[in-house]
Image (spheres, rainbow, N blue to C red):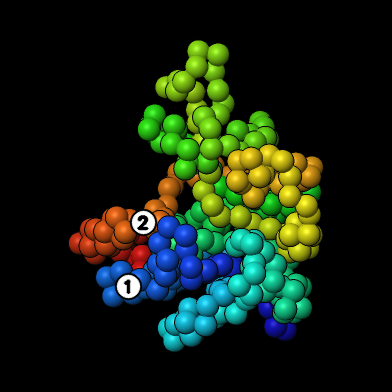
Amino acid sequence: MEHALQVIGIIPARLKSERLPGKLLIPIAGKTLIQRTYENALRCKLLDDLIVATDSQSILEHVQSFGGKAYLTSENCRNGTDRLAEVLTLNPTLQKIPFVINIQGDEPFLEPEVIQKVIEGLQSDKQIMVSTPITPIQTEEEALDSSVVKCVRRQDGDALYFSRALIPSSKKQGYQPETRYYRHIGVYGYRTDFLLLYTKLPSTPLQLSEDLEQLKILEHGYRIKTVVVDSISIGVDEPADIKKVEYLLCKQNTSSSPEESALP
């Protein structure tokens, strides 16, 4: 009997990035960013399939050239989540797969254990519609950076709120070293039926104010399970980040660590 697919990973890939246009096709030490991200995500053994959802014919053809799977989507998708939903809508057979994982296309060092914990968090409770990873913040600079999304959560792990501001705040004001702060990592696990519903829900005030998609989920009364991971991935948002990635690749190639050397 053929194995029924349970989890599919989808990498939304837009060619016209606002801060670094065309970044997914930039070569980094011999492979493009999207290829490194794709091959790295394949290391997660809980993913039954992995595809790229893109608005670009050039990205589509490139992914197919290195043996990856890709679907062409509309340029009118507002965000990566809409791109995922469009792939599902255009391919009804994919809608039968219970879980969908949204993996960012510009994070070639995302550890497979992070994706695995997101999947496990989603499967742990039928009432959970979405799961996402968070990791402890290590420095004051990181905590005060508005580009770093912070998260506060309930005792059971459900998210209470996400913000670009410092949360939890203190009556003492400012960063408090003794307070545990969490940074959100932009990977999402969805129940497939909820993902299709989510994109049809109207935008919400806090979502628009913070410019954070996940707040729409909370504002509409749905639960997001957070899973704590001891990991932080390195995204590529500006030219300087490319140098960082090249440095890390060079470093890992000379490392004796089996885990590091397994990275593409």
The x, y position of residue 171, in whole percent, is: 55, 13
Residue 2 appears in the figure: yes
What residue did someone put label 1 on?
27
The answer to which image quadrant residue 96 occupies is: bottom right
Any mark on residue 239, and which? none
As drawn, the residue found furthest toward the top would be 172
The image position of residue 50, as x and y in percent, is 56, 73
Location of residue 134 in the rendering, given as x and y in whole percent from the top left corner: 53, 43
Amino acid type shown at disc 2: Glu
- Nearer the observer, 172 or 247: 172
Q: CA distance from mark 2 to mark 1?
A: 14 Å
Disc 2 packing (10 Å; few <14; some 14–19; many ≥20): few
* Left or right of residue 165, residue 195 in this image: right
Q: Position of residue 54 (x, y in %)?
A: 56, 74
Q: Which mark is residue 238?
A: 2
**Of pointers 2 and 1, the one earlier in the residue sequence:** 1
In the displayed structure, does residue 122 sit left or right of residue 66? Answer: right
Which mark is nearer the camera, 2 or 1?
2
Q: Residue at x 56, y 79 (%)?
A: 70
Please say whether residue 100 is visible from this viewpoint. Answer: no
Type of amino acid under label 1: Pro
In the rendered view, would you say 34 is above or below 214?
Answer: below
Tell me the quarter of the picture where residue 24 sits: bottom left
Decide if residue 221 is on the left or right side of residue 246: right
Element type at mark 2: loop
Q: Residue at x 61, y 55 (%)?
A: 188
